[in-house]
Amino acid sequence: MQQSAVKRLTAINRIHNKSKNCFCLFFTLHTDITEVPRDCKIIWKFGDEIIARMKEADGNPSTYDGPGALFKDRLKLDKQTGSLTIANIRTEHIGRYSVDIKSTNAKLKTFQVTVHDVVESVSVMKGDSVTLHTGVKVQGSDQIVWKYEDQVIPIAHLNGPDDAKWRNIHLKDQTRDLVIGIIRTNQTGVYTVEINAISMVLHRKYYIAVGVGVKTISVMERDPVNLHTGVTEIRGYDLILWKTEGNIVAEVNKGTNLFGPRDLDDLRFSGRLHLHRETGDLTISDSKTTDSGDYHLHMSNSAYTLQRTIRVIVKTPPQSGAPSGICGAGVRLVVWAVTVFFAARFVDNEIKGVSVNIK
């Protein structure tokens, strides 16, 4: 069997982070043959896992999802050349690929693929909770390092009560996602994760900007309540939920193709909820005092999850004037006081006049 040297290939996964539009990169690993030989078998592997295969005799290529469904709906095998194309390649697809071409002249080719990902930008408000996703299920033998700026976050002590610096941070068990609860403004910065696994090396980088925003909204009864997501468009998010008192009152779900309010789940809002199609903002029209409470926003995509709580206070407007009975009594009291005052002045003048005449 002829074995070629390892080819080192680099792909750049281009992501426009402000809108989270993905300019999908189609990356092809070539067999360097112009036509699959007769009675040839081709097997593609990622690490030791078969991800695609084809027999020239039947001409029907097969592709597989791979470990952890890593390649689901991403692979295409060229019937003529046997070359493998990976759609929307990301950093989790870093690793060693090999193709075994079994024919009269058997050949094994190996590729080492590196993917550089653009920094994911995450804009949050002080007090939000943010989860940064690794995008993989971490195995026991995998090595993982999270960094804040250039400082390694001490994973071994991360969930301990004594480390005040990282007290609001913990890791999820299976994925080793980094969860930052009630984020502080001084936690703005660059976060990076590196996972060294058997079949790949994963690098991912995030920039978190923590700002100060409105967390309490106070309106008068019958005025609209506007709850903002803080984004200009929602195309980059797979799931957006608005909740209150445990009920989902609005949902944007790409997986199930759902968009709109769910006011039937909470009859208080019947016909009064409006979801903005571009931003995911939620408006409650004709507000009532019963609308007061905490509203929870959940926004997630493949890179991160954001959670925010907004407190809504709906007040009863002050009355424009006092009751008529009280007003009438007040007027009568003033008139009586004025009458008594002038009567007293009149009596006083008469007494003074009599006194003068006697003199």
Image: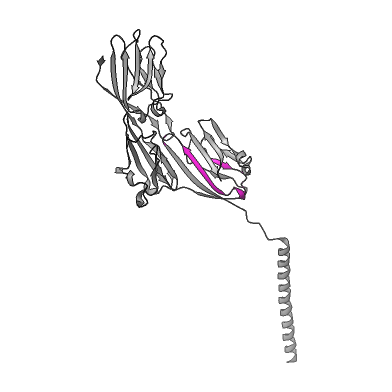
Q: Is residue 320 above or below residue 239?
A: below
Which residue is most to the top?
A: 38
Colour scheme: one colour
Quadrant occupied by the C terminus: bottom right
Query: Could you say where residue 159 lies in the image, as x and y percent from the top left?
Result: 37, 47
Q: Nearer the viewer, residue 130 or 121?
A: 130
Is 179 situated left or right of 298 in this image? Answer: left
Quadrant occupied by the N terminus: top left
Q: Is residue 358 above or below residue 285?
A: below
Which quarter of the picture shows residue 271?
top right
Is 22 situated left or right of 33 in this image? Answer: right
Q: Nearer the viewer, residue 333 or 306?
A: 306
Residue at the (75%, 89%) spot, across then down? 357
Query: Could you say where residue 332 lies in the image, as x and y percent from the top left?
Result: 73, 68
Is-magenta flag for residue 167?
no
Is-magenta flag for residue 288?
yes
Q: Nearer the viewer, residue 320 or 192?
A: 192
Tell me which segment is drawn in magenta.
281-303
Query: Could you say where residue 44 lies in the image, as x and y percent from the top left?
Result: 35, 19
Q: Is residue 276 above or below residue 113?
A: below
Query: Could you say where residue 45 lies in the image, as x and y percent from the top left?
Result: 34, 22
Which residue is most to the front?
A: 140
Which quarter of the picture shows residue 141?
top left
Q: Nearer the viewer, residue 103 or 219?
A: 103
Which quarter of the picture shows residue 129?
top left
Q: Is residue 94 above or below residue 318?
A: above
